[in-house]
Amino acid sequence: MLHTRVIPPAEGAYPYPLLIKRLLLSGVRYEKNREIVYRDHSRYSYQMLNERICRLAGALTAAGVKAGDTVAVMDWDSHRYLECMFAIPMIGAVIHTINVRLSPEQILFTMNHAEDKLVLVNSEFVPLYNAIAGQLTTVEKTLLLTDTDGAHADLPNLVGEYEALLAAASSHYQFEDFDENSVATTFYTTGTTGNPKGVYFTHRQLVLHTMAVATIMGSVEGMLGGDKVYMPITPMFHVHAWGVPYAATMLGAKQVYPGRYDPELLVELWQKEKVTFSHCVPTIMQMVLNAKAAQNMDFTGWHIIIGGSSLNRSLYEAAKAKGIQLSAAYGMSETGPLVSVAHLNDDLMAASEDERTAYRIKAGAPGVLVEAAIVDGEGNFLPSDGETQGELVLRAPWLSEGYYREPEKGAELWAGGWLHTGDVATLDSMGGIDIRDRIKDVIKTGGEWVSSLQLEDLCSRHPGVREVAVVGIADPQWGERPFALLVAREGHVLDAKILKEHLKPFVEQGHINKWAIPSQIALVTEIPKTSVGKLDKKQIRQNILEWQGSNSAFLSTL
Amino acid sequence: MLHTRVIPPAEGAYPYPLLIKRLLLSGVRYEKNREIVYRDHSRYSYQMLNERICRLAGALTAAGVKAGDTVAVMDWDSHRYLECMFAIPMIGAVIHTINVRLSPEQILFTMNHAEDKLVLVNSEFVPLYNAIAGQLTTVEKTLLLTDTDGAHADLPNLVGEYEALLAAASSHYQFEDFDENSVATTFYTTGTTGNPKGVYFTHRQLVLHTMAVATIMGSVEGMLGGDKVYMPITPMFHVHAWGVPYAATMLGAKQVYPGRYDPELLVELWQKEKVTFSHCVPTIMQMVLNAKAAQNMDFTGWHIIIGGSSLNRSLYEAAKAKGIQLSAAYGMSETGPLVSVAHLNDDLMAASEDERTAYRIKAGAPGVLVEAAIVDGEGNFLPSDGETQGELVLRAPWLSEGYYREPEKGAELWAGGWLHTGDVATLDSMGGIDIRDRIKDVIKTGGEWVSSLQLEDLCSRHPGVREVAVVGIADPQWGERPFALLVAREGHVLDAKILKEHLKPFVEQGHINKWAIPSQIALVTEIPKTSVGKLDKKQIRQNILEWQGSNSAFLSTL
């Protein structure tokens, strides 16, 4: 270690730990009349937001919550969620944002594993909560959230209803300082094997992530700023709605929370509240474009970041035709999540429309303070030539430092001092990331690596294909063979031979090798998805094995 | 202290210290073809910037510079200065940016106090350097900077010439990690009494300051971003050109360094390089507007931040008439410097042109992560009512934690755990700062506090006044009495009686009380200024006492 000069601060110098409460210094004060909107249910100013955060902190403290405790939230995306994202960490507690789309067994597992002490439950989730309440090992109290009169909901150990408790609490709260490395938030990520794993983020990490979000989405792209209107369409339980609510609050931007994702409502809110900035997964984007209310709408001025799954060109162009500027972004639960947003640099600004689109739908280049590299299976660095594939590894000041109470899995995540994303990617000379596949989804056939994502993209270009998933299935001769699961468009016929004919030109043009053509496909009406809307390849593989075992009628073989 | 949850990182988790080298991860990589321009002398890409920083680090290391050493720079604003701002701290050393406008005695003092070990000297400063070289107690080596062929300049212990050393060094350098609290930069601030004091900033502080600059000037105002063109007109020795070069580099913006501030050259560079963003003190702004080349120029699209001294309405409007958008900002050497920029919030966007101007020329509201308050002489907090005056005190993650080797002065700066700015201000309910005066310049007369800045503003509204300074002069009856130093415009006559007649209406309208009218003025051809162009009130008071002693002809008494 270098012997640099470190000087003890002058007597009295304030050490300024990076705490979440500091994100309330600018926007709340300077844009105090800007609004926080929750559907047609609630609408109030930033000044009120600040007051309500204080009241919530008081109510939680009165309910016995102490620093270091975990407080869980089961709610749709609302102003209350935003208030919890501030108040809970600001009193030194940890907010556990429960993924309400998990199975009851998984939710139960995460709540016991996170050692939740108090749970805020939306009245709509009371039946779900009560179904698992008997097996919760650490929860002592519950608090009711309701949009209607749910005051009589049957919750065990109920402290009270949210609005009533806030009304009874003081509008002032003295938030103490503490170690910036204190855990502030936790939530669980579901892998394809084993139990959900708890990622966690400290105050320091979230403040730095927030500054990076503001910088990247603001000064780099101009999407986010105090004068913008923000509506998240990514659940708040999932990596804090990608961290944007913290940044939007710091900057004092108007925020619109849509609750559940009814596409008609989203379009209505967009129009009524003059939304300029959102983020979502491709599936939701498609739903919004398909909404009845969207059909005659010109969405010009709406900038949307797409993450979670890869953004394809047809969705990009469909959105563009309606005035929406999409930009792909890359990140994951473990990364806070911001790694990159596909904004255009100087050279790309001058490039053709086609090249610009090609870049906008890829993952973009790492944002400020983010270091990215690709490595082979032994951790050796590979060249950034836009061709060589390797596992994407990262360093940034806001990456989860492990998994809660899972030291081995944490050490695996950080093997060699870099966070392993589990994604196969190429890096180009300007840092641009192109995600090729999940490592576990890459199809190893005949000594070659075939990207399942690329095959899905090529299959989806057939006019008869509405949805597609490609997985590798074990094969004694080739190691693995690609298998395609297809949903046909109405009025179209598909079989393995038709797909082969469709893919042949791509083999001839050198995009894929001939081993990449699936020799067996299945025609289905629906493709299994995970709780966050991604293709559930684990389930897909299981289904295929079952069908193959029973020689199902779904199957079509060359 | 609260017992929050602090979890040791997983084995192998990278701790990510906030180091200046990390600012080179985004812009340098992603905007590698953007340019760094130095007058008509040099022009190269970001990719080359990165390479040259590595070469400089290698050359300094080869010259014996070690972590913890202080390396001083005497240069005009150049690409070399930018390279030094990165390379020197990146090897763990401390860059001392020498204020070349100080007197030789003061420069000598700062160099010995900072314990400079190696000095980079522009050939134009060789005579100045050699004049003090014999009294330097710590300097071991020198390094020559030159725009011409200065290779034969007579410098003692010369290591070599900058470009030759860079050419000889490797284009790669492995920058090690170290403690983020290591000192990275130091420079000296000149008070009105005593020796210059050394403020200093750590890597952590500068990274956080850079993120805040990017956020405030980017996402809040849209002035700074990867697609903007930045030309500083504030010396790089002075608080790192207000910290913007670090932010511009992080974002990958084109940068234009003008060397010395020849107004004709500045206008020429603006036009040629398509500059969109600058910052300067009011004096320089006035010089640019007065430049011959500026007379028929439309500067639309140029956004300039004004700091250092207060921005008056006439300068604001003169700039606006030529298409330049000015925004006042507030900060000082001890604050990194960014505290606030006068951008418009939601309410102000809807206000009248007049109200918007009134706000744009004030200091603005504290930026992200900045906490501001006003206190009385005992440190009691005063109300933010836009009326009550008190000393402005601050907290932010990037304020100097003291003065180098001056623990008592450091403790005074941080009395009560807040940084004392020495400025008298009001705060309004949205946090807006209105600087009324320096504490030491406030005129205490007849039991009232009279702002010398306000008096200067009112005096300057007389058409015959070209420049004005007001100071308090001791008076046996009133404690102090205001004294005005005036420079008359050609063709105008001024005396104490004319000034009194001019000020009377402001007394009648309640802007000032009648004791505020100076009973004695002096007519001069020039007003003493400090090395950074501010009114030198210490010198002014001295002059007045001398004139009063000699009953000088300059004086005009009521």
Image: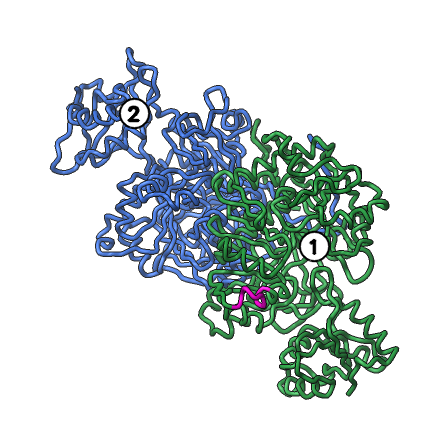
Chain colours: A green, B blue
Q: Image quadrant for the C terminus of chain B? A: top left
In the picture of the structure, the residue carrying the numbered disc 2 is B471
Residue A147 is left or right of residue A215, and the answer is right
The local secondary structure at tag 2 comes to strand
Q: Nearer the viewer, residue B507 or B494?
A: B507
Residue that lies at the very extreme toward the right in this rendered image:
A549
Nearer to us in this view, A56 or B246:
A56
The reply to whether the magenta stretch includes residue A289 is: yes
- Relative to A359, does residue B417 appear above or below in the rendering? above
Callout 1, which amino acid? Glu
Q: Are marks 1 and 2 on the same chain?
A: no
Mark 1, residue position:
A334
Among the 4 quarters of the image, the one containing residue A202? top right
Principal SS element in the magenta part?
helix
Name the one closer to the observer, B520 or B515: B515
Rate crowding at label 2 as few (under 14), some (14 to 19) or many (20 or more) other CA atoms within 10 Å: many
What is the x, y in percent for residue B366?
47, 38
Type of the residue with mark 2: Val
Q: In the image, which residues are magenta?
A: A288-295
Q: CA distance from mark 1 to mark 2?
A: 59 Å
Residue A478 lies within the magenta run: no
**In the depicted structure, whether residue A458 falls above or below residue A138:** below
